Image: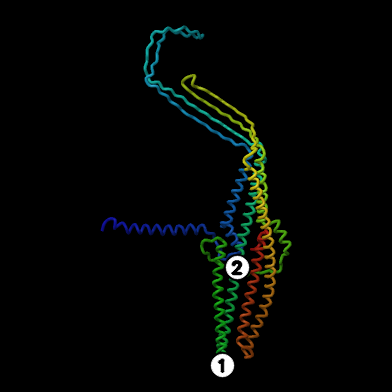
Amino acid sequence: MTRSDVRRPLGWRSAGVLSLLAVFGASAVLAQDAPVVPKQLRLADAIKIALGSSTQLGTDQAALDAAGKAKTAAWFNLGPDLRISGTRSSNTRKDFDKVSQVTTLEGDVITTAGDTIKQVPVNTATVVADVTEESTFKQGQLTSSIRLFDGFANINRVRAASQDQAASGHNLEYTRKRVQESVISAYYNLLRAKLLLRVAEEGETVAKDQLDRTQALYELGSAARSDVLKSQVQHGQTRLVLVRARNNVRQTHVDLEYAMNLTMSADFDIDTTVVIDTVQVPAYEGERDYAMAHRDNLLAARARERAAQVRTGIAKGALLPSVDFQYAYSMTRQTSEFRLGASKNDNRQWALFGSWNLWDRYQNYANIAEARAAARTNEYARKQAELDAVREIRQLVNSMDEARERFAVARENVVRSREDLRLAQEKFRVGAGTILDTITAESDLTLTRASVVEAGVDYLIARANLTRATGREFTEQ
């Protein structure tokens, strides 16, 4: 066996260990990031979890932050700009074998009063040597300019940016309510599934008891074989309903996890002792008027419409002249070993100038037409959003009224169905009725109890949807 053969199994083991560590490490990270879900999940807890991990809210929050930065940039655009530049260079020049005359002087006398006695040349010699010259160059420049007039385009940019920021804020608030609405709907649908499961379990229990009684009567000779078969079929049907009800609970549980943005399955239960109050049904006119003034997506549409109208003024600003003011300061410093090679310069400039683009090949007019078209598009979008809101509110009010009436009728039918089942069972026991009457009464009771659950939960969901549609805050706890 070679050395490579010995190392290969160790390499595979190391790779396997590293893979397991990576998997468990990723699972640990997901577990740390996942929110804590209580065992008994209340609606308020579900909403809080969803709002804390919503990707839609994160996207809209990023858009709002960007709109805020754009508004700040628009304000700064009203002020001056400032540019600073600088240059520094160092030069070295070396002349090889340069010939120069060196004269030796003697006899100079410099007195303390500053009088000088002229020196007398004694000796002159020719010297050949390398000469090095060093010099530096420094230059700095500061320039600032401000636009004094541009046809009010910069001011309109500030106004448009403010409206864009307002629209982003309303979009964020509307998304927050949509997230709450989706969680409330998913929570109530899970409540519906659990209540229907309870109805199915009780219906299966009633059918099983009836089957046992029929079987006992058959063995005593008081019931026919056909009665036993009918009871068995009825019990089988209730078991099928029970299977579907259990699966519906599992599915709605997953839907609630998805609404809360949970990446991993959570084991929790909800409170099924919910009091369904279907007394109040708001008037359509009042809900419509409130929505027109407070619904956030309508407020966002109006803000976008105003921003588009302001941008029309920005496009018109290009038709007017512009006036700018500019100030510049420059400084130059140059040093050299030679007296004539050094310099020091300072320069300051002020300038006020204007320009007027009288003809730009129709581009300004095309931009104005495009801005007006965008304003009309936003106007039509706002009107369509208002029409959609009005229709939605009307439908939700009608749905609440329908659910309220269904709930009241279904509760009355439950009382009647219980009494009908009691009478049918008693008649069958004394031989005055048939098993078919009992089976029909059992089915009717199960259906009426399910109708109560369906109507009550439909009312709760419609109420939550209407709260979002009118722009009100949710009060479900």
- What colouring does the structure picture have? rainbow
The crowding category of the residue bearing disc 1, from other C-alpha atoms within 10 Å (few below 14, some 14 to 19, many at least 20), is few
Position in image of residue 123 (x %, y %)? 38, 9
Q: Nearer the viewer, residue 275 or 152?
A: 152
Q: Residues within 10 Å of mark 2 (few under 14, many from 20)?
A: many
In the drawing, what numbered circle is on residue 440?
none
| Rendered residue at 72%/65% (across/down) | 282
Residue 322, image x and y in percent? 65, 37
Question: According to the image, label 2 marks what residue?
Answer: 189
Q: Which residue is drawn at 66% across and 66% down?
A: 462
Viewer-side label of 2, 1: 2
Give percent across and percent down for residue 139: 52, 29
Q: Which of marks 2 and 1 is nearer the N terminus?
A: 2
Q: Position of residue 63 (x, y in %)?
A: 59, 51
Can you say whether 71 is above or below 112 in the image?
A: below
Callout 2, which amino acid? Asn
- The number of numbered discs placed on residues in the rendered structure image is 2
Label at residue 221: 1
How far apart are the alpha carbons under marks 2 and 1? 47 Å
Q: Is 75 left, or right, of 344 in this rendering?
A: right
Toward which corner of the image does residue 274 lie, by quadrant? bottom right
Per the image, label 2 sits on a secondary structure element best described as helix
- Above or below, 321 against 166 in this view is above
Residue 476 vertical placement versus 78 (above, below): below
Farthest residue, direction front? 361
Which three-letter amino acid code belongs to the residue tagged 1? Gly
Quadrant hosting residue 105 = top left
Residue at the (71%, 66%) spot, across then down: 281
Asked if residue 288 lies left or right of residue 124, the reply is: right
Q: Which residue is drawn at 62% across and 32% down?
A: 326
Q: Give the quadrant of the C terminus.
A: bottom right
